[in-house]
Image (cartoon, rainbow, N blue to C red):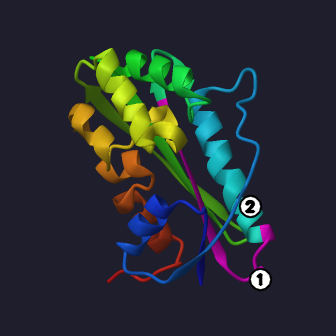
Amino acid sequence: MLILASQSPRRAELLSQLGIKFSQSSANINETPLPTENPLDYVLRMASEKSKLGWQNSAKNDWVLGADTIVLAKGEILGKPNDQADSQRMLKTLSDSTHTVITAVCITNGEQQNSVIVETLVTFGALSSKLIDWYWQTGEPQDKAGSYGIQGLGGQFVKHIKGSYSAVVGLPLYETKLLLTENGVINEC
């Protein structure tokens, strides 16, 4: 049995697209970056900690998948916004520029741990202050890394992407299936 160490409906929906059975558990961890931690190490550590916590809370005979997604713009990790002003700052940073979305996926069964990192370039068009304010009022950006959801209303800001769309949503399907198959969690169809 596979356990998704996340309560994210987006990750659960994506994982279900692989046609495998899984259950969900929460994995509430401290998501504060370490002072000298680079973005790749940070996102990998978050995914790893989520999978380990999920395994500790499991029946100990399951594989557990943890994932984390960050938005990196102009050298800054843009997490979930603290408030409207923080969201406005983030979206102004992303406006009319290209940023990187990094998603790490980690699986563990307590004895083995394997992971993959996927980077995707996302280019936004210009965002007016009025549009940014409207978007905040929709409620969508309030719990999203980088303060936007590509799969929702925030998708209208995207001029183009280079890489994995599903990784930007929160779980890179191709790479996740490879990781699960290579580790014998699922069989190749």
Q: Which mark is residue 164?
A: none
In which quarter of the view is residue 22 placed? Answer: bottom right
Mark 2, other Cα within 10 Å: few <14 / some 14–19 / many ≥20: many
Q: Which tag, 2 or 1, sits closer to the chain's start?
A: 2
Tag 1 secondary structure? loop
* Front-most of residues 186 and 68: 68
At 56% across and 31% down in the image, what residue appears?
A: 81
Q: Position of residue 24 (x, y in %)?
A: 60, 73
Name the image quarter holding the N terminus: bottom right
In which quarter of the view is residue 56 placed? Answer: bottom right
At 28% across and 17% down in the image, what residue appears?
A: 128
Tag 2 secondary structure? helix
Q: Position of residue 173 (x, y in %)?
A: 37, 61
Name the image quarter holding the C terminus: bottom left
Residue at numbered disc 2: 52
At 68% across and 64% down in the image, what residue appears?
A: 26
Residues shaded magenta? 56-71
* Front-most of residues 105 and 125: 125
Residue at numbered disc 1: 59
Question: Considering only vertical position in the picture, is 90 above or below 54?
Answer: above
Asked whether 82 falls inside the magenta stretch, the response is no
Q: Amino acid at mark 2?
A: Lys
In this orientation, does residue 163 appear? no
Q: Outermost residue toward the right?
A: 56
Q: Position of residue 105 (x, y in %)?
A: 53, 54
